Amino acid sequence: MAKRRAVGLLLTALLQTACIGAEYKPQFAWEQEVFSANATAQASLTGCAAACTLLEWTAYLSVNQPNTFEYDGDKQSYWSAQQASVSPRCFVQPNNAEEVAAIIRILERTDCPFAVRSGGHGAFTGASNIPDGVTIDLRRLNEVNVSEDRSTTRVGAGNHWIDVYDRLTPMNLSVVGGRVTGIGVGGLTLGGGISFFSGRRGWACDGVRNYELVTADGSILDVNYKSYPDYYWALRGGGNNFGIVTHFDLETFEQGPMWGGVTVNSMEHNASLIQALVDFTNNSPTDPDGANWVAFVYAQTYGQWIASTELVYAKPVENPAILKNFTAIPNIHSTLRFSNLTDLSREVNQSNPDGMRQTWTTMTFKNDPRVMQASLDIWKEEILPIQNITGLVPALVFQSIPVDVIRHFSKNGGNCLGMDLEDGPLILVNIATMWASTSDDEAVLSTLERLTERSTAKAEELGLSHKYLYQNYAGQYQDVYSSYGETNRQRLLEISKKYDPKQVFQRLQPGYFKLGA
Ligand SMILES: Cc1cc2nc3c(=O)[nH]c(=O)nc-3n(C[C@H](O)[C@H](O)[C@H](O)COP(=O)(O)OP(=O)(O)OC[C@H]3O[C@@H](n4cnc5c(N)ncnc54)[C@H](O)[C@@H]3O)c2cc1C
Ligand SMILES: *[C@@H]1O[C@H](CO)[C@@H](O)[C@H](O)[C@H]1NC(C)=O
Ligand SMILES: *[C@@H]1O[C@H](CO)[C@@H](O)[C@H](O)[C@H]1NC(C)=O
Ligand SMILES: *[C@@H]1O[C@H](CO)[C@@H](O)[C@H](O)[C@H]1NC(C)=O
Ligand SMILES: *[C@@H]1O[C@H](CO)[C@@H](O)[C@H](O)[C@H]1NC(C)=O
Ligand SMILES: *[C@@H]1O[C@H](CO)[C@@H](O)[C@H](O)[C@H]1NC(C)=O
Ligand SMILES: *[C@@H]1O[C@H](CO)[C@@H](O)[C@H](O)[C@H]1NC(C)=O
Ligand SMILES: *[C@@H]1O[C@H](CO)[C@@H](O)[C@H](O)[C@H]1NC(C)=O
Ligand SMILES: *[C@@H]1O[C@H](CO)[C@@H](O)[C@H](O)[C@H]1NC(C)=O
């Protein structure tokens, strides 16, 4: 134990004092021994087995190795069954940015591929877990600390939104964050982040005042509009490509009680729901306190095709004018009520259980009922033949990107998503599908691929498609960064090369969406 501690201190010292960005120079006798003794010694310190050992025994970090209760728990904590079936060489759970920096330096030295996990809601294999690599699980970065003047909240990147809302709602405060309690702060914020408050304040990435970021060489930077404007722009939509965010300082605002809930309509009302969404999307700038989504779903248990609509108003006003075209449609079930953010986001959490197989894909349309109607018809036609697959819950979800939201994308130097005011208003499409068994993967995935292709082609034919692909809803074969526009993608690549010259986050972190060549 004494040796372990001593070596641990040495490595920590090494990691903290080594010259950032320079070529590796041994500084300590011990370091000489471990990293540069001779070719044999070096070879034995390459790869993820070595990385896991170094993390645990020399850097003194919390590591969960296979065949332990903790390791199995880490695996089971992913949302999708696909991610939960991936076995990394080990999980490591850092307590602070310094430990994240130590981890990155060891992974870089040992050339060990890694993944980073916040809330674990990325759906596909490898999004935030990695076979035979090291998975950096941020769950211990769980600080939620409101500044004295109540204008910002420092949020650890391993929190779920419920941790943030449980703290803020009783203080009559809020932030621009996820709408479902179980989602991670990390992934949602780095991909964009649609919130109930987006009409007033943009997406979650637009509400970040400062990122505490660990870079490829193990530096810890405060990245904000003043300190590193280019890096800040890239992080507002750049996913996992630019470093590991350890804390977000989120703009915080007064937020009291709200009104909202879920209504369920029978499928025959599809045209009225689509028209209500088109009107809402056009009219949102007149009252940015309204928010909603419209989901068409096949409810296998009841053998029914239905529409499930989330309606939310950020003030305690019953049935506000901006949402009246939805509430006027006859429903078969409604939970509309006076409520608050914690309560509303818990309610929608219930329809997203852990442990199912999941696949998501995305498209963006112009705000026109014809293209939504056409994609609904294609969706239903394609889903019908697989409707009885065990546990299948297929959903086609439409949401607004009104111009009041897009207006916030340009504040503080803008985000990198590539949408301008003249692009809007837009409709974001999310085709979300869950099912129970691996034996149905082929049937489900081929159906989804075909239906996405057909819908995209139809939208193009109608002249109502838009290039944008929302990272947080995209399927693994979709080219998210090209959809930001070639100018933005090239700028992202330049920023990546500037701050990560060895391309650690591109090369050693293969999962999720990459910038490309
Ligand atoms: C049930 C459900 C509800 C949803 N609701 C919303 C919603 O209301 N609004 C919305 O916009 N989206 C929503 N989404 C989509 C959601 O934003 C994405 O799935 C998001 O990636 C989840 O983030 P996570 O941290 O939970 O996932 P993870 O799988 O942990 O992370 C996703 C990706 O981000 C990277 N990442 C995470 N944290 C960091 C970090 N600190 N530093 C560097 N990289 C990091 C990971 O490496 C991974 O590649 C929802 C998803 C689900 C499943
Ligand atoms: C190389 O390093 C290994 C491990 O430290 C050691 O066992 C071996 O004797 C060294 N070989 C030489 C030629 O120094
Ligand atoms: C919250 O932040 C303040 C400084 O703004 C700091 O003094 C305090 O220790 C922090 N609290 C926690 C629990 O981290
Ligand atoms: C939020 O609403 C729920 C349900 O009405 C209620 O139980 C809870 O106390 C409310 N929370 C706050 C902080 O007002
Ligand atoms: C929150 O607002 C309510 C109603 O306006 C008020 O009664 C309560 O004292 C406030 N709580 C805090 C912590 O400010
Ligand atoms: C939409 O509703 C109409 C009736 O209003 C119905 O004929 C049509 O089948 C519905 N569309 C779908 C995809 O269910
Ligand atoms: C409600 O629907 C009517 C008729 O389509 C439309 O003129 C109006 O703008 C809509 N209102 C809102 C708030 O969307
Ligand atoms: C949200 O749902 C997930 C999956 O069912 C569950 O594990 C989690 O505890 C839920 N969170 C809350 C706050 O209810
Ligand atoms: C699915 O099951 C229902 C009810 O048993 C049946 O009517 C329907 O034809 C089945 N669909 C397919 C594609 O097999």
Image (cartoon, helix red, strand yellow):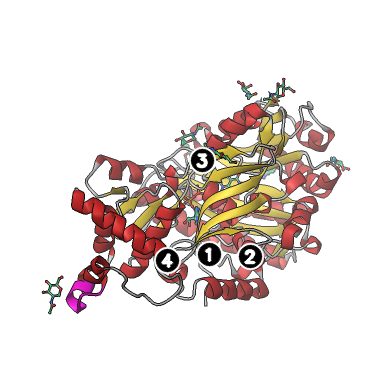
Residue 458 against residue 192 in the figure, above or below: below
Give the residue at x 60% y 51%: 430
Crowd rating for badge 3 (residues with CA inside 10 Å; few <14, some 14–19, many 20+)? some
What's under tag 3, amino acid-wise? Answer: Glu
59 vs 123, nearest the viewer:
59
Residue 387 against residue 168 in the figure, above or below: below
Mark closest to the chain's N terminus, 3 or 2: 3
Report helix, strand or loop for mark 3. loop
Report helix, strand or loop for mark 2. loop
Magenta-drawn segment:
36-43
What's under tag 2, amino acid-wise? Answer: Tyr
Where is residue 362? Give x, y as percent: 59, 57
Q: Is mark 1 within 8 Å of ligand 1?
A: yes
Q: Is mark 2 within 8 Å of ligand 1?
A: no
Mark closest to the chain's N terminus, 3 or 4: 3
Q: Is residue 405 left or right of residue 183?
A: right
Q: CA distance from mark 3 to mark 2?
A: 24 Å
Mark closest to the chain's N terminus, 4 or 1: 1
- The residue pinned by badge 3 equals 143
- The residue pinned by badge 2 equals 228
Mark in the foreground, 3 or 1: 3
Residue 214 included in the magenta stretch of the image: no
Q: CA distance from mark 3 to mark 1?
A: 22 Å
Q: CA distance from mark 4 to mark 2?
A: 26 Å
Report helix, strand or loop for mark 1. loop
332 vs 238, nearest the viewer:
238
- The residue pinned by badge 4 equals 510
What's under tag 4, amino acid-wise? Answer: Pro
Give the residue at x 73% y 63%: 413
Report helix, strand or loop for mark 4. loop
Give the residue at x 43% y 54%: 98
397 vs 489, nearest the viewer:
489
